[in-house]
Amino acid sequence: MGVRTIGVVIDGATGRLGTTQHLKALLAIRAEGGLPLAGGDRLMPEPVLLGRNAETLKALAEKSGGLSWHTDRDAILADPKVDIYFDATATGGRPERARAAFAAGKHVYLEKPVAETLEEALDLARAGERAGKKGGVVQDKLFLPGLKKLRKLYETEFFGRVLSIRLDFGWWVFDGGAYAAQRPSWNYRRATGGGLILDMFAHWRYVFDRLLGPIEAVSCRHATLQPRRRDESGQWYDVDVEDHAFAIFELQGGVLAQISSSWANRVKRDDLLQIQVDGTAGSAVVGLHRCFIQPLPATPRPFFSPEQPQAMNFDLQWQEVPDIEPFENGYRAGWELFLRHVAADGPFPAPLIEGAKSVQLAEACYRSQRERRWVDLPPLTP
């Protein structure tokens, strides 16, 4: 038994995702002595922090146990001790950064979306194949407790024949005036790869394809509800991307799914994400962590009276699915899969072609808005 090291560059390490999710996941693996591999060896990730602000990088590196850090992307890609390039920076420019990493002989792991256009996303997948290197995209939501419980309901045929699906997501993002915004300004600028559909529908694509049913067609409408916002320097700017969208997905087999996503609505439900699946034998409502079910024999017979308020408390008529299996951080779960994929050729369910499928959905949504019609999503290959 021995310890094998694997160098991982985190580009955008000081950003929210880079620090609180991905670096945290890698540090947790290191704290446990590395990732166990078949045969008894342990794989030890060696993170290198990459960004633009030397002072911030140095502080984070010291706080994280004396990690290496760098501000020169080209120099760090030339380092033979680096095996994996990971990008958690703004979407704009991601294909160029990833192609440079492939050209430097690195494996590439990317936050979503992998590109702004389907053509770029497919070209990126081909670049990885030409380089003979592995590529992957983050699909963290699949590992959430609520969605894993939902998957178990499908596996045990709880729903019978699925009739319809509804997904509601979003929260109020302040415009930066009275209160600071909770999302970075690049999310609201086209030039930097912003837009709610490009950002969030990347999640919905893999959630549906892997859990709920493959998407075959989409009809979508979107809008910009907060057209003026204040950026990190306090300057007001015009928003030129959507922050609010409604869509209908047609799934394989004809099931319809209603999708509501917004950065401009206030939450009155159990969670920021809520998915309801209705079937002939039962229904389920899941959030990020919790899952509630109502089987056919326990379904109530509601009534309507114009003279008095509804007497039934519908919320109390649902049963919560308990935590039977252990759950782990979704970002860490993704890293474990990709690290084993690179070091031991382990299976990895989210290669770059899966990232391209997410961009395909976003493009179809934008096209549906422009042409006011349904748009099909044909199968993709690199």
Image (cartoon, grey):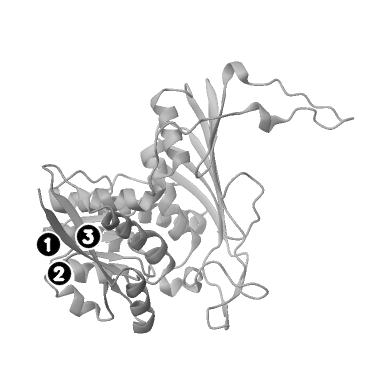
Disc 3 is placed on an element classified as strand
Closer to the observer: label 3 or label 1? 3
Near mark 3 (Cα within 10 A), the count class, few <14, some 14-19 or many ≥20, is many
> In this figure, which residue is indicated by the disc labeled 3?
45
Instruction: Give the residue at x 37% y 56%.
Output: 359
Q: Amino acid at mark 3?
A: Pro
Instruction: Give the residue at x 14% y 47%.
Output: 345
Q: Amino acid at mark 1?
A: Ala
Residue 192 visible within the image:
yes
Q: Amino acid at mark 2?
A: Ala
Q: Nearer the viewer, residue 85 or 27?
A: 27
> In this figure, which residue is indicated by the disc labeled 2?
103
Q: Are marks 2 and 1 in contact (CB under 8 Å)?
A: yes
Near mark 1 (Cα within 10 A), the count class, few <14, some 14-19 or many ≥20, is some
Residue 213 visible within the image:
no
Q: Nearer the viewer, residue 369 or 153?
A: 153
Counting residues from the start of the chain, the first of labels 3 and 1 encountered is 3
Q: Are marks 2 and 3 in contact (CB under 8 Å)?
A: no
> In this figure, which residue is indicated by the disc labeled 1?
131
Q: Are marks 3 and 1 in contact (CB under 8 Å)?
A: no
